[in-house]
């Protein structure tokens, strides 16, 4: 199966290089890496172009509509792979991650989406703690009956994306894009939680905007349970 990796990018000059290197160095190479420029004003795209010169699999596309949902959709709709991966620019993937994704989809045709537990790599007091991820997955499955996709890194079948691409919400002020994607895609098959490998995500939102992370995020999550109740 062909794998496309989509990286939404808005002013990610501090993180993009390490994210790209973690994808380029995968044991299972992606067929294409699509960096979606969402109106960056820093050096993000200069960095992207530097690596594009070295690796022909890297493509850069532009999305003028601001927001992670618009950027993800642009990448997914541009991608040619059978498996679509969305990876945040501040995420670092273990070398075996794409191989695990590929194996999961090959072994079980009922799997339409893939997720993991997460670790935070840059907040000292909670570095490498998995308790937050366990609680998050447990709570969401308790409320919905299925696992939740994680925005920092997730994978879905393109055939499933084509079924829901006109249904997903685009207003990032009204939804968490990964939860919205989870809810819409869940009716078409199984979301697989692979516990054998984790994703490493930045905790910068905890460090620089703790109110948003610990208050705003949960409140929007509860709001979504109400607005999406007919789908869940």
Image (cartoon, grey):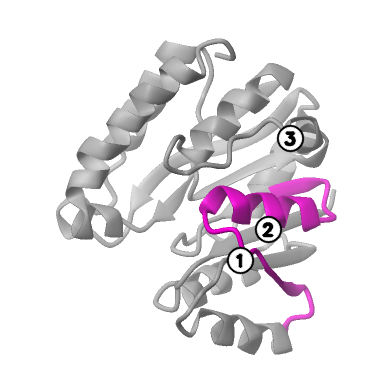
Q: Which secondary structure, mark 1?
A: helix
The answer to whether the residues at label 2 and label 3 have Cβ atoms under 8 Å apart is: no
Residue range highlighted in magenta = 55-84
Q: Is residue 61 visible?
A: yes
Where is residue 5 drawn, in percent x and y? 68, 58
Does residue 109 appear to the left or right of 153 in the view shown? Answer: right
Q: Position of residue 42 (x, y in %)?
A: 45, 82
Tag shown at residue 166: 3
Residue drawn at (51%, 24%) of the image: 147
Mark 1 and mark 3: Cα distance apart in space: 28 Å
Earlier sequence position, callout 2 versus callout 3: 2
**Circle 2 Cα neighbour tier, 10 Å, few/some/many (<14 / 14–19 / ≥20):** many
Q: Are marks 1 and 2 in contact (CB under 8 Å)?
A: yes
Residue 128 position (above or below residue 189): below
Quick one: label 3, few (<14), some, or many (20+) residues within 10 Å?
few
Circle 2: element type: strand
Question: Does label 1 or label 3 sit earlier along the sequence?
Answer: 1
Dot 1 alpha-carbon crowd within 10 angstroms: few under 14, some 14 to 19, many 20 or more:
many
Closer to us: mark 1 or mark 2?
Answer: 2
The residue nearer to you, when weighing 44 against 122, is: 44
Q: Tags 1 and 3 in contact by the CB under 8 Å rule?
A: no
Q: Label for residue 75?
A: none
Q: Which residue is mark 2?
A: 5
Residue 79 shown in magenta: yes
- Residue 138 appears in the figure: no
Location of mark 1 (residue): 23
């Amino acid at each position: 199966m062909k794998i496309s990796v989509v990286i939404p990018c808005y002013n990610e000059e501090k993180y993009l290089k390490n994210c790209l290197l973690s994808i380029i160095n995968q044991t299972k190479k992606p067929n294409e890496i699509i960096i979606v420029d969402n109106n960056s004003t820093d050096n993000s795209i200069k960095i992207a172009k530097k690596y594009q010169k070295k690796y022909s699999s890297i493509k850069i596309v532009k999305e003028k509509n601001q927001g992670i949902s618009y950027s993800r959709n642009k990448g997914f709709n541009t991608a040619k792979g059978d498996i679509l991966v969305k990876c945040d620019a501040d995420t670092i993937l273990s070398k075996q991650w794409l191989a695990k994704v590929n194996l999961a989809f090959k072994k079980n045709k009922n799997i339409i989406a893939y997720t993991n537990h997460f670790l935070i790599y840059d907040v000292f007091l909670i570095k490498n703690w998995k308790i937050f991820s366990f609680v998050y997955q447990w709570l969401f499955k308790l409320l919905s009956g299925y696992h939740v996709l994680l925005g920092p890194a997730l994978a879905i079948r393109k055939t499933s994306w084509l079924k829901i691409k006109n249904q997903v919400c685009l207003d990032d002020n009204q939804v968490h894009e990964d939860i919205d994607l989870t809810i819409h895609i869940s009716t078409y098959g199984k979301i697989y939680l692979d516990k054998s490998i984790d994703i490493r995500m930045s905790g910068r939102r905890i460090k620089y905007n703790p109110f948003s992370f610990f208050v705003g995020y949960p409140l929007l999550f509860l709001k979504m349970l109400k607005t999406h109740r007919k789908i869940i």
